[in-house]
Amino acid sequence: VKHPLMHKWTLWFTKPPSGKGDNWNDLLKEVITFNSVEEFWGVYNNIAPTSELALKSDYHLFKEGVRPEWEDVQNKHGGKWSYQFKEKRNVPIDELWLHVMLAAIGETLEEEGDGELMGVVVNVRKGFYRIGVWTRTIGKSIPNGGDGDVAGGKGRSTEKGREILMNIGRKFKEVLKLPASEAVEFSGHTDSAHSGSTRAKAKYTV
Ligand code: M7G
């Protein structure tokens, strides 16, 4: 008997660059798509744990049909909650990433009908691990069926949209078991793309 998940999920991997000239598109690889609890464990038990990945690797677990990129139509008006663990040696990254994946596929990061969660990511970097939760919006309604420029301020910022994002941030912080003194930060992908990296100004914190 297979226990179905609410959505189909695709695991992606970013390979570390092997030399010069590797661009993002050469490095991002689709691994596998699954839609049951049993298949999830089958995949999980057969891939390298995050703690064993080389620097500049990422795992991305996204809803089927959404590429784990800012440019994807379903991400381009969105953003992400993220947290960096700087004590790499002391942090139980495999357990944390597992809990974040389970929260995503178990649909506990958002309320039913929110429709915000796109995927979750773990980055292995020189001085830190970073875990992120990508959302469809930045707390603004998306105009023109998704083609408008939300970052330009045309999207309407709604109290409800913002509250949905804050709830996802709070839930994410809970899954990571972070103390109240630590801040989890939200930033829009447009800011990330413009600054050339994810180190963009935070819009919200929890
Ligand atoms: P990062 O992994 O988000 O953060 O981005 P880091 O700076 O802490 O490593 C690293 C680099 O990967 C970016 O500067 C981009 O060159 C590339 N990159 C990452 N993402 C998520 C994307 C993306 O969605 N689209 C494109 N085109 N490049 C990306």
Image (cartoon, rainbow, N blue to C red):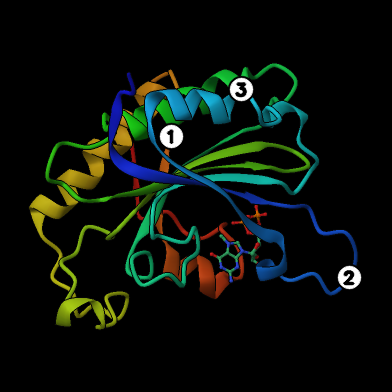
Q: Which residue is mark 1?
A: 183
Residue 181 is at least partly visible in this image: no
Instruction: Give amino acid for label 3.
Output: Asn
* Residue 46, quarter of the rendered image: top right
Q: Secondary structure at mark 3?
A: loop
Real-space Cα separation, disc 2 to disc 1, in angstroms: 35 Å
Please give the name of the residue rendered at 23% of the width and 37% of the height, measured from the top-left corner.
110
Q: Which residue is mark 3?
A: 45
Crowd tier of the residue under label 3, counting other residues whose Cα lies within 10 Å: few below 14, some 14–19, many 20 or above: few
Front one among 9 and 148: 9
Q: Is residue 167 above or below residue 116?
A: above
Front one among 196 and 116: 116
Whichever of callouts 2 and 3 sits on the residue coming sooner in the sequence is 2
Please give the name of the residue rendered at 41% of the width and 51% of the height, measured from the top-left corner.
80
Crowd tier of the residue under label 2, counting other residues whose Cα lies within 10 Å: few below 14, some 14–19, many 20 or above: few
Real-space Cα separation, disc 2 to disc 3, in angstroms: 33 Å
Q: Which residue is mark 2?
A: 20
Please give the name of the residue rendered at 19% of the width and 71% of the height, measured from the top-left corner.
142
* Residue 78, quarter of the rendered image: bottom left
